[in-house]
Image (spheres, rainbow, N blue to C red):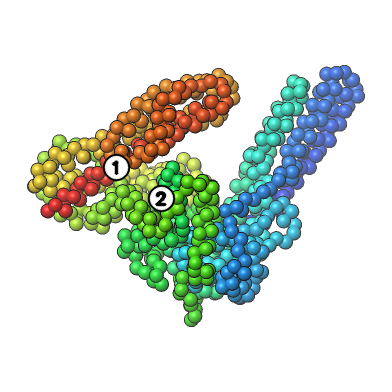
Amino acid sequence: MNIQLSDNFRKKTLGAIFSIVVFIIVYIMLLILAIMLTALCAYGGIMLIVNFPKFITILLGIGLASFGIIILFFLFKFLFKEHSVDRSHLEEITSKDYPRLFGMIEEIVVEVGTKFPKKVYMSSDVNAAVFYDSSFWSMFFPISKNLQIGMGLVNTVTEQELKAILAHEFGHFSQRSMSVGSYVYNVNQVIYNMLYENESFDKMISGWASITGYFSIFVIIAVKVIQGIQWVLRKLYDYVNLKHLALSREMEFHADQVAANVAGSLALQESLVRLDLAQHAYNLAINFYEKKSDDKIISENLYQDQLFVLDILVKENNTPLKNNLPLVALEDLRKYNKSKLNVDDQWASHPTTEERVNALIEINITKDSVKNNLAIDLFSNDGTIEKKMTVKVFYYSTFDKDVRRLTIDEFKKEFIDDYNKNTFPKQYNGYYDEKNIIPFDLSEITDFSQIEAMDRLFAKEKVDMVYSYISIEADRNTLNNIYTKKVPIKRFEYDGKKYMRKEAGALEVKLDAEMQALKAEIKKNDIAIYRFFYNQAKIRGIESELKTKYITLFDEDMGYEKKFQLFSKFTEQADSLGRATSDEQVEDIFREFSELEIILKQELKQFLKKNLLAQEITKTMNDNLSNYFEGNWSYSKNPDSDQEYLDTMFQAVNYYYYFISRSYFLSKRDLLDFQIALLAER
């Protein structure tokens, strides 16, 4: 296979290599300066002791010599760090286990003209990746690459699509520029160690400084010098990584070309646009079990669950099928994204899916022979591998003898019940999925003569209006970040027109005006919806009940911010506790906790009385809150009891946060369900 590298690819490769050379030069210069400084300090210390042999000068001489040694050791300490990689979440597989899969891998290896992976692993997620066993010394010796295949991916692609995805990964195998990634990885490890992994180093120099005040003087100066070195390292980190990420984006396009040559453009296109949906289905299944953790419920086969959830999403969105899998169109990815802002994200390691798909369409390589059977057929069809990877996901729960595994039939029933509880009726056409009803004064709505039809109230243009508002708000916030230099972007594009950073402020003001106008239109539609359902309720004589539900929801809306502020105060105090350096500071923080807890307990007890929340509060929640309410919790200066106090309190704080959001959601759904019920009674 002979794929010509683009000029841009070569340019980015040279840029990445140059950045590594710059790092090496700067690091060597720092080392030389540190060695010279150490030698001078040692010489100065010896001369001080020799010429003025007194007890004080001996201490000062040793302290001066240690000044240089501390800085030199700081620059070398990364060499003594032990590297351990946890791969317990992966399952190594062999050709003996899955000959058909390894046969396909062998075909790709031959066609791409690269080496077979050192090891092949299965992971639980919706992904495939290449990784290597990288260490400091691997920068100087050849390294073998490993292949990782996600079970959640295999579960949702055809054999041809899996071949395309793996060919993409083998495209990385064949890229000599991937060696640059190994260098960048190790450069990052070195810099990260010197910036953040300093606990043992800090402990060592603190111990040295505590011997005598004379030593501490030189330790303080050494720390200031080290902080200067760290400033240089942060700048180098940004520089090296920006250059490498620019190369990474080009490497993705090149690997896509390899995949298209092996399996055809279409196979990779269709799998790429489906991945978000497959990931969403996987996440929904995982989230379902996370909510069941208190009840000690796990999955028997997570990947059967994923397919069931995928089927629900397909039916809900009217997505067509091809080869028994959803055929997601590129337009579906843009469906709810109305953004007009185009910013070149320098920190992105991959191009966008749309950019990759458009590049594949341009290549347009077709294959006469394709295998459209499901990729899972490459494995034995008894579900062994799915169950193995399911165990990996729920690894720690499997040790509990009381754990219960849901069969697929049990999952279907319980998931549908849970899904229906957490979604809004389809009749609203997604109008309320990402928006809340804008509060208005019900007493001012007196004219119910002009009523719009329901299909117009929830028509596509009304839903688009909601998502346009959301996108404009996001664009405005991004522009604010650009204008205030919170993000390092000098130029950008909006609605096809190019702008400089200094113009972002004026554009932000313009977007804010658009937002307010759009919000007024949405509010107008919300009022029209109220009028429509008020008339429906009035026919049945229950208009006061509808009005009460609106008032309840608006009260929830008004109280939400105040309640959330209480939660924020707890998190702020927790952050302060983590930074506290004295007993007095810790005591002040616990005193503040005690005052906040008075309000917290009152609020929690109010939530427990709410009828709408009754079904949401589990026995575990009730027991934990009872323990919190009834316990005599206070700061005792005993580490064990104080930690128990903090754990119990923040468990209650997390329940409080859950109750805030859940209470609003349930009030909203109660109103929306009530309105739909009015239509059913006609």
User: 252 left or right of 287?
Assistant: right
2 or 1: tag closer to the N-terminus: 2
Residue annotated with mark 1: 666
Mark 1 secondary-structure assignment: helix
Q: Nearer the viewer, residue 674 or 265?
A: 674
Q: Residue furthest bottom?
A: 368
Position of residue 312 in the picture relative to residue 137 (left or right): left
The quarter of the picture where the N terminus appears is bottom right
Name the residue located 50 percent from the left edge and 59 percent from the top edge: 387
Mark-to-mark CA distance, 2 and 1: 18 Å
For mark 2, give the secondary structure: helix
Q: Residue at x 83, y 33 (%)?
A: 40
- Between label 2 and label 1, give the one nearer the viewer: 2
Query: What residue is drawn where x is 35% and y is 43%?
Result: 509
Relative vertical location of residue 425 with respect to residue 650 in this rendering, above or below: below
Residue extending farthest to the front is: 401
Mark 2 Cα shell of 10 Å, populated few (<14), some (14-19), many (≥20)? some
Amino acid on which disc 1 is placed: Leu
Q: Which residue is mark 2?
A: 288
User: Residue 454: horizontal and vertical position, in percent?
Assistant: 18, 54
Q: Is residue 616 left or right of residue 353?
A: left
Using the image as rendered, state which of residue 633 and residue 53 is in the foreground: 633
Quadrant assignment, res 274: bottom left
